[in-house]
């Protein structure tokens, strides 16, 4: 009976780990995360450019923020293509 209880605990632990992994994966691919990264990049770059006295810092901060957004939107496609090539070997 102790073995059965141990197995049930192990299965419960594995299921809990799977829920955490699934939640982490959902966060990594979520639009909420991408929007927050874009927003924080824009704010950080705007503040930095203002501190070093770049003309129109908040307008210029759009460029790195958009570049980050585009990279987060396109990298999954490049990853898929790379994985297909990798698994062909």
Image (cartoon, rainbow, N blue to C red):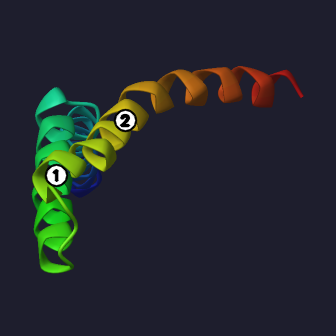
Residue 29 higher or lower than 67, as above or below: above
Residue 56 higher or lower than 79, as above or below: below
Q: Residues within 10 Å of mark 1 (few under 14, many from 20)?
A: many
Q: Is residue 39 left or right of residue 27?
A: left
Q: Earlier in the sequence, mark 2 or mark 1?
A: 1
> Which residue is more in the foreground, 68 or 29?
68
Query: Residue visible at 89% across and 28% down?
Result: 89
Q: Position of residue 60 (x, y in %)?
A: 23, 50
> Which residue is more in the foreground, 19 or 13?
19
How many marks can you see? Answer: 2
Q: Position of residue 6 (x, y in %)?
A: 24, 55
> Which residue is more in the foreground, 78 or 2?
78
Q: Secondary structure at mark 2?
A: helix
The disc at residue 54 is none
Q: Position of residue 64 (x, y in %)?
A: 32, 49
Q: Position of residue 77 (x, y in %)?
A: 52, 21
Q: Secondary structure at mark 1?
A: helix
Tag 2 residue = 72
Query: Residue visible at 84% across and 21% down?
Result: 88
Query: Residue visible at 16% across and 40% down?
Result: 33
Residue 83 higher or lower than 36, as above or below: above
Query: Residue visible at 17% across and 75% down?
Result: 53
Splitting the image into 4 quarters, where does residue 16 fall?
Answer: top left
Q: Residue furthest right?
A: 89
Q: Is residue 54 left or right of residue 76?
A: left
Residue 17 seen in render = yes
> Which residue is more in the foreground, 17 or 22?
22
Splitting the image into 4 quarters, where does residue 87 fall?
Answer: top right
Q: Residues within 10 Å of mark 2 (few under 14, many from 20)?
A: some
Residue 5 seen in render = no
Q: Is residue 36 left or right of residue 69?
A: left
Tag 1 residue = 42
């Amino acid at each position: 009976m102790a073995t059965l209880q141990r197995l049930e605990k192990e299965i419960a632990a594995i299921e809990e780990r799977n829920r955490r992994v699934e939640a982490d994966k959902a966060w990594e691919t979520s639009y909420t995360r991408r929007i927050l990264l874009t927003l924080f990049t824009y704010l950080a770059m705007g503040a930095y450019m203002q501190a070093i006295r770049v003309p129109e810092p908040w307008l210029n901060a759009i460029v790195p923020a958009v570049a980050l957004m585009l990279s987060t939107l396109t990298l999954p496609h490049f990853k898929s293509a790379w994985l297909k090539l990798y698994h062909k070997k």
